[in-house]
Image (spheres, grey):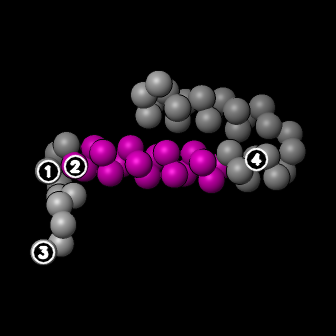
Amino acid sequence: MTIEQHIEELRAELKSACDTVERRQIQAELELAQADLAVMLAEQDGAIETGPPF
């Protein structure tokens, strides 16, 4: 599963979640997946480097 697919799956789960605790958990996981995707895209564009800081 790609990160994009995972994000879409989490969005779908979030829409159908009824329990507040479950919604918070899904929202947190969604935010982490979106952040991972943003980092991956920035690495591809050369906007950031992931090498050691020294």
Q: Residue at x 25, y 50 (%)?
A: 42
Q: Which secondary structure, mark 4?
A: helix
Q: Which secondary structure, mark 3?
A: loop
The mark that comes first in sequence, 1 or 3, is 1
Q: Which secondary structure, mark 1?
A: loop
Q: Residue at x 43, y 52 (%)?
A: 35
Name the disc covering residue 46, or none: 1
Identify which amino acid the numbered label 1 is placed on. Gly
**Residues in magenta?**
27-43
Identify which amino acid the numbered label 4 is placed on. Arg
Q: Name the residue furthest bottom.
A: 54
The CA distance from mark 1 to mark 2 is: 5 Å
The mark that comes first in sequence, 1 or 4, is 4
Q: Any magenta on residue 44? A: no
- Is 10 on the left or on the right of 2, as rendered? right
The CA distance from mark 3 to mark 4 is: 40 Å
Instruction: Single out the mark in the foreground, 1 or 3.
Output: 3
Name the disc covering residue 23, or none: 4
Residue assigned mark 2:
43
- Is 30 on the left or on the right of 19, as rendered? left
- Is 39 on the left or on the right of 25, as rendered? left
The CA distance from mark 3 to mark 2 is: 18 Å
Q: Which secondary structure, mark 2?
A: helix
Q: Any magenta on residue 39? A: yes
Residue assigned mark 3:
54
Identify which amino acid the numbered label 2 is placed on. Glu
- Quarter placement of the C terminus: bottom left
The mark that comes first in sequence, 3 or 2, is 2
Q: Residue at x 18, y 72 (%)?
A: 53
